Image (cartoon, coloured by chain):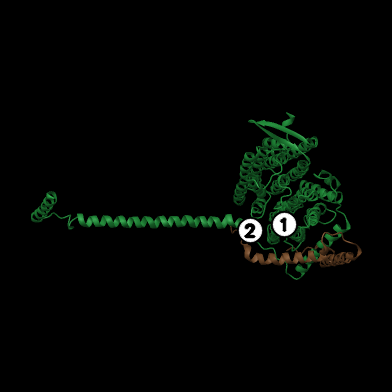
Chain colours: A brown, B green
């Protein structure tokens, strides 16, 4: 680790915190945006409030948890085949 | 003479001649060859056809319609940015293999009959394997062998399928095929291997990461998209492709989350994106096909960009393993920024090329009322954000600082990446020129409130899920390891079974031989006991005994004779 150097702009806790806050704010704004227009959708459920937010958030979490479970079965050392 | 200058021929012949040029100029000559080929392509009119006679058959060497043209164009774009990216390469064969490979892919995309297609198809396999072998490691050698076997198998299936098709229909035209014919089924599998269908896919993740820095960029741009073109040409509207494609979008992303080699992550990501294209082809409506083709176009460019940025990292840092990287934004800020353009493009962020193309396929799925497939595609869209949108740039350039301080990527790599990034942004903001190249008229408006808003919602909240997992320490760490995939079957399971069959038969043979030996020993022992002294037949008999037996036998003979 080269922490004798100054942490770069992207490594500073303040920057990271700022980024996360911005993301939350933007997310809330988009969620709120659901009220303002009529989605022309193919399926009724798409019109539900926050449907896509839910899909994005849930898919991501689901993906990671299943992947972690799979890792226990599938993981091998790097020279397994060599 | 001009007739035989089929699209891609300049790349092909230029590539064959290139190895004799001095190493210093080779890279530049390669770029020149690519640009010449572009000029040639631009001179070809739409609908251009070239027929040649071949031993009594009439072969359509070139059929330059809208579908062929759009692939020929994007293949040329890939050839140009790849050659610029590879300017530093000194290996004698790498540029040549790449050019021949590109030329063959373009030739295949413009072929009008199955035999011509086959020749170019095999040529892509034979030339591209050198890009893997050029890496020089034993590992790369073995991976290249496996790759070659799979690709040639695909070619053999294509050839045999073509024979059956010819027998049945009397035609060799490379056009729409019906899965009820045997020939068509063989050809379907041949295309499926090269398109990385589930269970036929692992050659992609096995071989691509073993290639050289520039080699992987080139590899990713041609074979799989050629297969997509072939599927679009012959199997558009084939319903079976929809579940196959949906499966292809879903399963690779689980593997991509776990992989340590970042180029292997991108290979799984490639598989996932191919799924979108396959679904589009399967649906077969004009919107769906346009979407699949447009997505292939955009994908070559942003995947090339991502692999170029990872190639640059590998080139400078000497490793591409996520657990050994991190903090590179300090040393390679431009590469990092360009990588992020690519990763946001693949994630489908509005404003970039992935959004205007992927959304066509997703919309077409919704329009066709394929609910389950639609859901899977949405899931896959969120998944892409994880492995390509976040994981690749984050763990390479940010995350925990690996302590590595390297130089920024060389100028030519930056130029190549910037070119690709500019296209991602350009197509994203102004898709009309791409839409005009598509085979059907485009009636689609990507920048509607619905499309933009729903996509942004999905991406932002997926991103928030990532932040949450990181904060809670639940995000899977980067571990030096590999993960088993279907290649385990032919790299471990089958060789072991075969070895135990060989063992078993060796065992059986040994046991049998031992039995035979024991029996022989028994017979010989018995004979010995009788015929050697002091055995009854081994010791000389006394005269008395001999006479007694002689008289007995005479008496017996008399009695029997008298009868």
Q: Where is residue B75 in the image (x, y as percent from the top left)?
A: 75, 43
- Image coords of residue B511 (percent x, y): 39, 58
SS at mark 1 in the image = helix
Visible residue check, residue A11:
no
The single residue placed furthest to the right in the displayed view is A36
Using the image, determine if residue B49 lies above or below residue B83.
Answer: above
* B190 displayed left or right of B549: right
Q: Which residue has dot 1 on it?
A: B246
Q: Tell me how many marks there are.
A: 2
Which residue is disc 2 drawn over?
B485
- Distance CA(mark 1)–CA(mark 2): 18 Å
Disc 1: CA contacts within 10 A as few (<14), some (14-19) or many (>=20): many
Q: In which quarter of the image is residue B155?
A: top right
Instruction: Tell me: B443 left or right of B105.
Output: right
Chain of the residue displaying label 1: B
Vertical order, B37 against B132 (above or below): above
Q: Which chain carries label 2?
A: B
Task: Spot the residue most to the front.
Answer: B563
- Between A53 and A41, the one lying in front of the other is A41
- Residue B327: x, y in percent? 76, 60
Confirm whether circles 1 and 2 share one chain. Answer: yes
| Viewer-closest of B211 and B522 | B522
B310 vs B484, left or right, is right
């Amino acid at each position: 680790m080269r922490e004798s150097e100054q942490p770069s702009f992207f490594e500073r806790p303040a920057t990271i915190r700022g980024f996360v806050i911005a993301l939350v704010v933007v997310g809330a704004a988009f969620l709120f945006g659901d009220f303002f227009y009529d989605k022309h959708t193919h399926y009724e459920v798409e019109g539900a409030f926050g449907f896509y937010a839910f899909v994005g958030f849930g898919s991501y979490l689901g993906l990671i948890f299943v992947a972690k479970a799979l890792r226990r079965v599938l993981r091998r050392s790097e020279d397994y085949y060599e | 003479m001009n007739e035989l200058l089929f699209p891609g021929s300049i790349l092909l012949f230029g590539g064959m001649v290139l190895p004799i040029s001095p190493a210093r100029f080779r890279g530049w000559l390669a770029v020149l060859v690519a640009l010449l080929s572009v000029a040639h392509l631009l001179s070809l009119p739409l609908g251009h056809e070239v027929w040649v006679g071949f031993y009594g058959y009439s072969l359509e060497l070139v059929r330059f319609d809208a579908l062929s043209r759009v692939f020929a164009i994007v293949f040329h774009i890939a050839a140009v940015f790849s050659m610029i990216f590879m300017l530093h390469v000194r290996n004698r064969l790498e540029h040549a293999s790449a050019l021949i490979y590109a030329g063959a892919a373009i030739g295949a995309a413009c072929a009008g009959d199955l035999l011509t297609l086959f020749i170019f198809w095999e040529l892509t396999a034979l030339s591209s394997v050198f890009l893997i072998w050029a890496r020089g490691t034993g590992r790369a050698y073995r991976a290249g062998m496996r790759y070659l076997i799979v690709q040639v198998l695909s070619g053999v299936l294509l050839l045999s399928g073509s024979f059956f098709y010819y027998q049945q229909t009397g035609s060799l035209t490379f056009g729409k095929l019906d899965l009820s014919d045997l020939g068509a089924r063989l050809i379907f599998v041949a295309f499926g291997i090269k398109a990385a269908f589930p269970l036929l896919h692992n050659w992609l993740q096995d071989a691509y990461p073993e290639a050289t820095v520039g080699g992987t960029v080139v590899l990713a741009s041609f074979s799989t998209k050629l297969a997509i073109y072939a599927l679009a040409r012959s199997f558009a509207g084939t319903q079976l492709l929809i579940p196959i494609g949906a499966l292809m979008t879903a399963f690779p992303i689980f593997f991509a989350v776990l992989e340590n080699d970042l180029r292997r992550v991108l290979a799984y990501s490639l598989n996932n994106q191919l799924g979108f294209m396959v679904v589009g082809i399967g649906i077969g409506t004009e919107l769906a096909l346009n979407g699949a083709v447009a997505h292939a176009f955009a994908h070559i460019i942003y995947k090339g960009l991502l692999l170029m940025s990872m190639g640059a990292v590998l080139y400078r840092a000497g490793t591409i393993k996520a657990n050994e990287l991190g903090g590179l934004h300090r040393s390679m800020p431009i590469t990092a920024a360009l990588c992020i353009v690519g990763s946001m493009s693949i994630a489908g962020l509005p404003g970039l090329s992935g959004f205007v193309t992927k959304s066509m396929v997703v919309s077409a799925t919704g329009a066709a009322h394929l609910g389950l497939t639609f859901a899977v595609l949405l899931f896959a869209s969120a998944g892409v954000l994880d492995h390509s949108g976040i994981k690749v740039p984050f763990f390479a350039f940010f995350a925990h600082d690996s302590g590595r301080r390297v130089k920024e990527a060389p100028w030519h790599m930056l130029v190549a990446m910037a070119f690709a990034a500019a296209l991602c942004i350009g197509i994203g903001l102004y898709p009309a020129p791409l839409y005009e190249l598509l085979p059907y008229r485009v009636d689609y408006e990507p920048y509607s409130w619905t499309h933009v808003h729903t996509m942004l919602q999905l991406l932002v909240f997926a991103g928030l899920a990532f932040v949450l997992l990181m904060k809670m320490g639940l995000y899977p760490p980067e571990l030096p390891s590999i993960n088993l995939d279907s290649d385990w079957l032919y790299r471990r399971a089958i060789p072991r079974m075969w070895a135990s069959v060989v063992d078993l038969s060796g065992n059986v043979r040994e046991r049998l031989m031992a039995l035979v030996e024991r029996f022989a020993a028994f017979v010989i022992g018995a004979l010995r006991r009788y015929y050697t002294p002091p055995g009854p037949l081994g010791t000389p008999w006394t005269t008395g005994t001999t006479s007694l037996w002689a008289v007995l036998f005479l008496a017996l003979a008399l009695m029997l004779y008298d009868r």
